[in-house]
Image: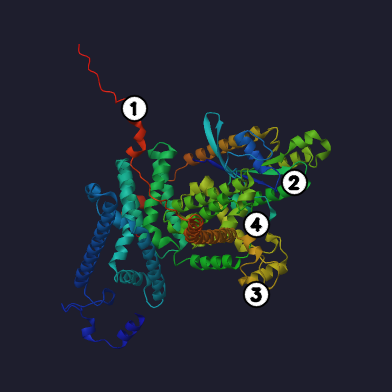
Amino acid sequence: MRVDAKVVMLGKESVGKTSLVERYVHHRFLVGPYQNTIGAAFVAKPIQVGEKVVTLGIWDTAGSERYEAMSRIYYRGARAALVCYDLSDSSSFQRARFWVKELQNCEEHCKIYLCGTKSDLIDGDRSLRQIDYHDAQDFAEEIGAQHFETSSKTGKNVDELFQKVAEVYNSTAFQYMTAEETGVDLGQKKDSYFYTCCHNN
Amino acid sequence: MSQRTERRGIHVDQSDLLCKKGCGFYGYTAWQGLCSKCWREEYQRVRQQQIQDDWALAAKLQREEEAAYASSQGAQSQPQAQSTPPHPGHVSLGPFSKFEEKKTNEKTRKVTTVKKFFSPSSRTASKKEAQEGKSPSPSISRQASFDTDQVSKDFVDFLKNLQKPGREIHKQSRAFIVTMSSKKDLGADELSECVQDFYQHLADRLMGHFKGSSDSVEQVMDQVEKYIMTRLYKSVFCPETSDDEKNDLATQKRIRALHWVTIEMLCVSFDEEIPEVSDNVVNAITDIIEMDSKRVPRDKLSCITRCSKHIFSAIRITKNEPASADDFLPALIHIVLKANPPRLQSNIQYITRFCNPSRLMSGEDGYYFTNLCCAVAFIEKLDAQSLNLSPEEFERYMSGQASPRFSTSDGDLRQAGSSPDVTATNPALAQLNHNLKLLSGLSSKQESLMEAAQSLQADLIAWPETVQREVNGIVEKYPLEILSRTVSAIDANNMENDNLPPPLTPQVFAG
């Protein structure tokens, strides 16, 4: 299947990256043993945006700290990154900050989506919340990111999040295309070997 | 070779320089001392000979196969078997001879590298040497071109459907290969850039031609990649200008040094006790090793993908839920450590340099490839912390003084194969022990069967004796008394029956 954009899921172990993808792609949240899918590590998902269909390739990543050094290999060339944190775990938010910094340094074309997870837990018991909504919102504005609080259990904000990713990608891709079409350098000699008969250099 | 050139530098005899066939022209060492004309004849002759030998062998194999088939199937199937051309027998020899050929090529390539130091102009020298490398056995070059010829044929067949643009694509691809063959001395990165530029421009032009139908463009690009990379493989895979070979060796050594890493340390969720899981693990290892044998970057990628799919099945069977990246990456590391795939770094570099970038960046294959890169990076950087070990333990394991498979830290326990820990960690050994137990049970059963059979035999031998004895006893107890012979005429007993009525006579009723 052809994939238009690469989207990486980043976040500390067990914040619910896989569940988020699983919820979005298969519309389910299951506790305990479930079958039918081989793995949720890579998913290609076509999304309708206006009249076009954008296919997102969603890359799950290993969140364990022992693989931290390798995370750069994962998000290379990504068009969007979903930085996830657990709303009931302040340490996961610290890790989210770390990834945001990394992304800003290494992948300037990558759009960042800050994504709080497990909001159903918070709705059940307000005292469990460790990350204030407004703090996260402020941080998101500061880094120019979109901010969502989601629940893979109830499905809250999940579809909205991925729809937004696809829409933003679509509009930026359109910009790229128009930018490329406006200027063609006639003096360009780059593809000269298509037009010459001597291929010696 | 180098010795001979040195000697030639000091003393040159006219007769040494002439063609060995005595035609009067000068000979050349790379042509085994023949002149160009005689060499060509000789080469053609050997080549023809080789082809004929191959055909003869193929025909022989075919005949043998037919004979075996005929004897098993009966005579009626013979004409059918004969109608097949002698090729199948020949082709079935393929895989092994290909392997041989690869080895030999590698050898000649390495020799060339060494020789390069001795020659003033490296480019011309390598060309001559390449020819010399081929000369001992022309069949090598012929075998090697068998693959590429097939690919070229497929490529042309594919392009025929595209008609005019197809011819254009073919022309450009050929021209590009010619260009590339003159750029052998460039660094690996420049080579990569050339190929990627070519992909890019061709894709752009195709995009214009197919009016934005990216699927058709992709299809064509796949074929172009296959054609070009099969042709260029030898000169651009693990090129002499790069450090790939050195890195390969370093990684191989590193993985060997890490032989003691267990799946528990990596937190892999495999339960290799389950036969399905261990089957998947074996398949995954086979797939990743197979990667080295492919030429086209895309084929190499699909090996990685297949390997990954097996890992996913193994995890799913073990955990009974779909695997996430948190499960997958450690499992892949485990597989790489177990497989120690040949020329791993070269293959990764080759794919990175020459694969179609769109596939590598976002597609599913790209995802698995990225994970493989991560696994290799992890293995390179692996330390005590990443395995949750203390630095001392890690050092001890690395130096081989201790092995985590044995509870004691003594180093000399490695040969003790029957320790229960070993059976616990190694499923194959456990299976072996299980089978041994079954076998010993079987042999004890057979022994008791033999005993029973022997006692039965003894019983059978004893039985007639006891019967005999009983019969004798009875005979003794009741001796045969022969009564005195009395008159036995039947009529004598019927003396007083004279007054019986006469027997009935049939009466005839007339009427």
**Dot 1, how many residues are within 10 Å of its Cα: few (below 14), some (14-19), or many (20+)?**
few
Which amino acid does the dot numbered 3 rest on?
Asp
Q: How far apart are the alpha carbons under marks 2 and 1?
A: 136 Å
Q: Quadrant of residue B335?
A: bottom right
Q: Residue at x 51, y 49 (%)?
A: B305
Which amino acid does the dot numbered 2 rest on?
Phe
Element on which disc 2 rests: helix
Viewport quadrant of the N terminus of chain B: bottom left
- Kindly identify which residue carries mark 2: A93
**Dot 4, how many residues are within 10 Å of its Cα: few (below 14), some (14-19), or many (20+)?**
few
- Kindly identify which residue carries mark 3: B412
Q: How far apart are the alpha carbons under marks 2 and 3?
A: 49 Å
Q: Quadrant of residue B235?
A: bottom left
Ranked by sequence position, the earlier of labels 1 and 3 is: 3
Q: Chain of mark 1?
A: B
Closer to the camera: disc 4 or disc 3?
Answer: 3
Closer to the camera: disc 2 or disc 3?
Answer: 3
Q: Are marks 2 and 1 on the same chain?
A: no
Closer to the camera: disc 1 or disc 4?
Answer: 1
- Identify the disc placed on residue A69: 4
